[in-house]
Amino acid sequence: MSAIALTNATLFDGVKDEAIPGMNVLVVDGRIEAVTDQSITGKAVTEYDVGGRTLMPGLIDAHAHVFAINLVAEHDRNIPLTEMTARAVPRIRKMLDRGFTSVRDVAGGDVGIRNAIAQGFIPGPRLFVGGPALSQIGGHGDHRSTTDESLDIDLNSSAFYFTCRIVEGVDNLRSVVRNELRKGADHIKVLASGGVGSPNDAIEIPQYSEEELRTVVREAAVRGKYVCAHAYESAAIAHSIRAGVRTIEHANLINRETAAMVAAADAFVVPTLVAYEVTAQHGERLGLSPYVMQKLNMVNDAGIVMLGLCEDAGVKLGFGTDLMGDMEFAQLQELTIRARVQRPVDVLRSATSVNAQIVQRPVLGVIAPGATADMLVVDGDPLKDISVLTAPEKNLRMIMKDGQIYKTDLAAKAA
Ligand code: ZN
Ligand code: ZN
């Protein structure tokens, strides 16, 4: 049995509005066994007095791409999966270094990389993966040039092997979804509107028919899984929601009426604002085309308005980042961007307990008896100043995942 006590903590449990001082947390074999203001000294093998610092759940990023090693997706095209994996290893480790103990990969991440982390071969956050995102012809995942007539639609090949797969029609979609779920996908991602990074599709156009989306949702739902949809404009969001999609990714161009519809369906919106902000700053220099830059600026300006609309409508807001290539350094800046509109506690709830609901794992993202012991010890009060989390090398004094101390500079006391 391994037992660790974290004592004298100011506890943000991932749910409540306030942090509570003077709390002790006992971790036994990877699970939180007790959360109490009573003494737990003597019950643990190892004790860390956290000295009144903030103890909070590990962060969860609900929209990332571990294999997006290049900013320009076309550059990933001819990279074998083994090379891709090797190049992704430092990206993945850095996510954990920033305090992300779980990450949902919504295009590209496969069960192999998820399992390798779970088995301890690669240090990194617990992953939730869906394989390649599914795209219609001419959709956000169709990166062929306009003169390229080649197309190979089958279960194993398409324009983008890792990230996206072109699949059309109800019957083909049913087969592909069944196959991804057979392999062990945690969710299925569909591209339900145009996007920023794709060379030829307008951002506002809905993609896939409602019938096609409904087929994907049904196949996932019978296995207890769900569908996330990339969508920007209200028309695409509404058609995804009508088809039963559970999480809307990005949603920058949503209107008030559609936000109310998302709330009524008990679905989630996962904003990814930092991706637009930092890519707008650096994209031109790094080779994004003028058309992509134009689309980027349009959604960047709308994103901050979307937050207010969704909050007013009572939409459950998750937390995502969507950073490609070298832009990944900015992962924690999503916290401060969100806090321009929202209270820090609401942003932190999104990045902990709400994202845990999104990944269908309510034992994550909370500090409570029975929860998985993913926790951070933070210097400073992120409920007052969320920016303390953006300097993890200085302010993250402990990172615990699954009850294992991944990193700490606090001294253990003999218990
Ligand atoms: Zn997307
Ligand atoms: Zn994405």
Image (cartoon, rainbow, N blue to C red):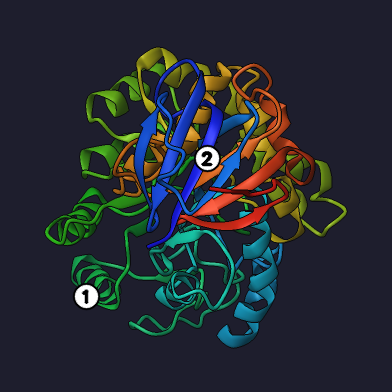
Which residue is pictured at 53% across the width and 48% down the height?
Answer: 415
Q: Is residue 273 above or below residue 407?
A: above
Q: Taking the image as drawn, is residue 208 in sight?
A: yes
Along the line of sight, the residue nearer the viewer: 345 or 149: 345
Secondary element type, mark 2: strand
- Residue in the image at 65% along x and 52% along y: 323
Mark 1, Cα crowd under 10 Å, few <14 / some 14-19 / many 20+, is some
Left or right: where 164 falls relative to 228:
right
Q: Are marks 1 and 2 in contact (CB under 8 Å)?
A: no
* Residue in the picture at 56% in, 28% down: 8
Specify whether 354 is left or right of 307.
Answer: left
Look at the picture and state if 204 lies above or below 141.
above
Task: Kindly report the distance in space between the C-alpha atoms of the residues bearing marks 1 and 2.
Answer: 49 Å
Location of residue 153 in the rendering, given as x and y in whole percent from the top left corner: 37, 80
Can the viewer see residue 296 in this picture? no
Position of residue 2 in the picture relative to residue 399 (left or right): left
Instruction: From the viewer's perspective, tell me whether residue 243 is left or right of residue 162.
Output: left
- Spot occupied by residue 152 in the image (x, y as percentages of width and height): 42, 84
Which numbered disc covers residue 270?
Answer: none
**Spot occupied by residue 370 in the image (x, y as percentages of width and height):** 29, 44
Q: Which residue is mark 2?
A: 6
Which residue position holds label 1? 175
Quarter of the image for residue 410 reads: top right
